Structures are given as C-alpha cells and as structure tokens.
Image: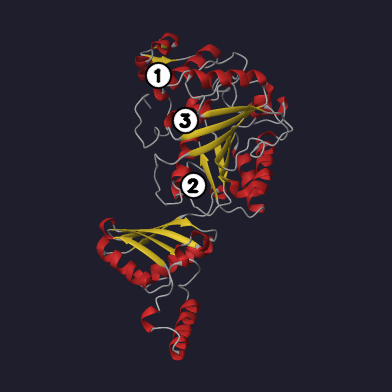
Amino acid sequence: MPPSSVSSVEGGRPYYDGDVDFDALAAEDADFAAICKVSKDKRWIDFQDPKVVQQLTKSLLKCDFALSLELPNDRLCPPVPVRWNYVRWIQELLDTTSGDYRDHYDPEREVLGLDIGVGASCIYPLLACSMRPEWRMAGTDVDQHSFDYARKNVEANGLAKRIKLRLSTSDRPLIPLDSMKIEGLDFVMTNPPFYTSHTDMLASYAGKQAPPSAVCTGADNEMICPGGDVGFVTRILDESLKLRERVQWYSAMLGKMSSLQQLIAKLREHNITNFAVTCLQAGYRTKRWAVAWSFRDLRPRNDVARHGDLVHAVLPSPTAQTIPVPLMSAQFAGDRVSGILQELDVRWQWREAIFTGVMKARENVWSRAARRKKKFQAERDIGRGEVDAMQLDGDEGDADDDENVALAVKIVCKLEVVEVRWLRGHDHVLFTSFCGMLKRGLTGRA
C-alpha cells in the first residue's frame, strides 16, 4: 500500500493489507531511498540490518502519520503496519459500540486509553493520538531506559498534554486505575512479551522454512515474561474480573494462534460472551492476533467482532443476521417491519428516508407465551375498567431506559433483504429469537 499523509477513512487511515510499497515510500522520503537496494528494477531492503529496519519504521511514521521517532539500538523497533492495524481495530471497536448507536467515528467523542508496556517507541499512544484529536492516552512501562525514550518521543511530537506516562514495577497492577486516579477507561491495549523463556523463543523459529522476517533488537523484558503472552494477558483478565465495567474494552495482541485459542477458552470459562477477535496480518509474512472483551452490553459490528482470517473455534457469536425477502422493495419491507413491531410492546424508531430503524425491548415480548400473557392481561384490565382500550400498546418508556434494555437492534431494509444488527444485550439467544420472529413475520417461514 503506498504511503499517504492524507487520511482516507474517518478518524484514521485504512488497515495496511499488503506489503509496503518500497517504490512509493522511496519517492516520498529521501532517507528511506538512501537505504534501499535495487536489483532487476526491483527495490528491496535488508531486513537483517537493524539500522535499515529502524529507518523503515521512521519513514512510515513520517509519511503516513506525520510522526517522528528516536529509538535506542538495544530496544524493540516496532513494525508500523501491524501496530497500526491494532490501533485501527480498537478505533472500530469503539466506533461501533457507542451509546448512541452511531456505528461510525464521532469526532467529538472523548476517548481515554491505556497502553500497558509502551516501550521505547511509545508507538501505540503516538499512533492513537495522531489520528484522533479528542483521544488521550495513558501509558506504563517497567523499564527505565525504554521509559526515558518514550517520554522523549511524546515530547518531540508535541503530545505531552495528551499522553501521560508512568513508570511502573512488575509487582504493581497492570491496570492501576486507582493509583492513577482514573475512574474509568474506554480501552486497554497491550503488546506483551510473547515468550516464556529464551528456549521458548528459539523453539518458535524451529522447523520454519524461513528465518525471522526481520532482525529483532528487543530486550529480555520486551520479549520474555512468565507464562509468555498467555500468562501476561491472564493477569489482565484477572484484573478485569474485578474492574469490570470501569473499562469498556480490554484488549491484547498475541503472537500465536494457540495463545488466542487459550485465552478465548478462559473468557468462556468466566462466561464472558461479549468479545471480539482479529487477525492483524499486514503483509505477506507478518501475522499477529488480538482479542478484546467487555463486561458491558454494547455489541460491536459483526465485521469488527469477527475480523480477519480466523478459525471458527475462536469466533464470538455473530452480531448480525440477514433475512432474504424476495421481490420486496426497501419501502415495502420497511412497512412490513414497522407493522410487525408496532404490535409489540417495544420502542421502535423508524427513519423512513433511509429505511433504517432501531428497536429496543426490555424483555422477550414477541414469543407466543408473551403475546398470550399480554392479551390475557389486557382483557382482564378492560373487564375491570382499569385501563382504556386505546392505551393497550403498553408503556414504552421503560424500553427507552438503557438500564432496562435487554435487546436493541438496528434494522436496515434494502431491496430483497432485511439486515438485523445486534446493538445491545447480553443474551445471544434473545437476539436470535427476535430475528426468527421477524423472519416468520416477513416471509411466513421459520
């Protein structure tokens, strides 16, 4: 993908989805052109040379994000594409789980995040704040040498007012909300050490057909920790079980698919059903994974919750269903949907101009049992003279109270198809039950 200093998506730039275009980058940055080699009219670089790898990172940050970076030779040099893809995914998680159900970037929304282990580059806070002016970041690290460089990089990019760093120790909480005097966070992110030991790190390369794609200059504290990435993220999970809704999204990048599988199993053991996964592939060889989980009931868009090339076993429950409605126009389908929902004790807001509506319900009011109960109650109340027959649509006020919403969905009507997007709720069975009812009402088929 050619570098570009111009954002082509709201509040950021697109995911990197291929290898860096060296020709385009060299044309834009003379420092990068100087370290390139050319053979058979093809430009290439030596990924085993630490200075070359550093320059690639610096040039991408300069051209794509208008950031400058200073790095020591004895600390990790972060590849930009996969790091940006992680930040971009966090952006989409937050954009599609806002309280107003916008499903897209809100430039006025103030966001506060925490990066656990900023490293010498402080790359995640720099990327996050460079793309969105209302975002602020807190960051921690346990290594004084890395911390000093991180602070310099924050100051050099004029972001000291929006990025606050804190030197920590290995025995302190990873999410120190109370000691930092922070009531809550919108997200937590981390790129933890992947390996349990030097032996584990060497074993990860054994049997591979090719050597590591780039030289690694990471220090032991950046590459190795007890339990590797699973052990580190399990500590975050344990802290999240106490903090719960004080953080909207807890997340972590992982080095192996097996690590992702282990952590998904741990989430399920704790009955955490609102989670999202992604494959952060940003080129031919570089592949990482990330997981995020939330104790709140706002559900991310389906393509965000199940993002990238993933095995079925790690996927969360779908947050979208599509109902085919052959021969129906968007207008006709919308009228049918409105007719169905107006008969239920739910709150239904329909925007006819764009054939889109939002439904909120405080409980399952569409099952046969619920309808019989409502009919019986209405007949009994009328018989007693306790309620006017014209008021039997129910009190919709409770359904509009977020604390009483068991299910919220967005319904979009298009030519021959109705799309249902799960916005809010803890119960996937309730969501699928609603979709089934709507399908029967629209098509007469289960």
| Residue appearing at x 41%, y 66% in the figure | 347
| Image quadrant occupied by the C terminus | bottom left
Where does label 1 land, which residue?
Answer: 22
Give the distance between the C-alpha atoms of the residues marked 3 and 2, in whole angstroms: 25 Å
Nearer the N terminus, badge 3 or badge 2?
3
Give the distance between the C-alpha atoms of the residues marked 3 and 1, in whole angstroms: 26 Å
Q: What amino acid is found at the position of numbered circle 3 in the picture?
A: Cys
| Residue appearing at x 39%, y 39% in the figure | 107
| Residue appearing at x 49%, y 47% in the figure | 305
SS class of the residue under badge 1? helix
Residue 152 appears at what percent x and percent y? 55, 18
Where does label 3 land, which residue?
Answer: 129
Quadrant of res 18: top left
Q: Residues within 10 Å of mark 1 (few under 14, many from 20)?
A: many
Quadrant of res 182: top right
Residue 348 appears at what percent x and percent y? 38, 65
| Up-down relation of residue 233 to residue 325 (above or below) | above
Nearer the N terminus, badge 3 or badge 1?
1
Q: Nearer the viewer, residue 271 or 186?
A: 186
Where does label 2 land, which residue?
Answer: 306
SS class of the residue under badge 3? helix
Give the distance between the C-alpha atoms of the residues marked 2 and 1, in whole angstroms: 31 Å
| Image quadrant occupied by the N terminus | top left
Residue 263 in view of the camera: yes
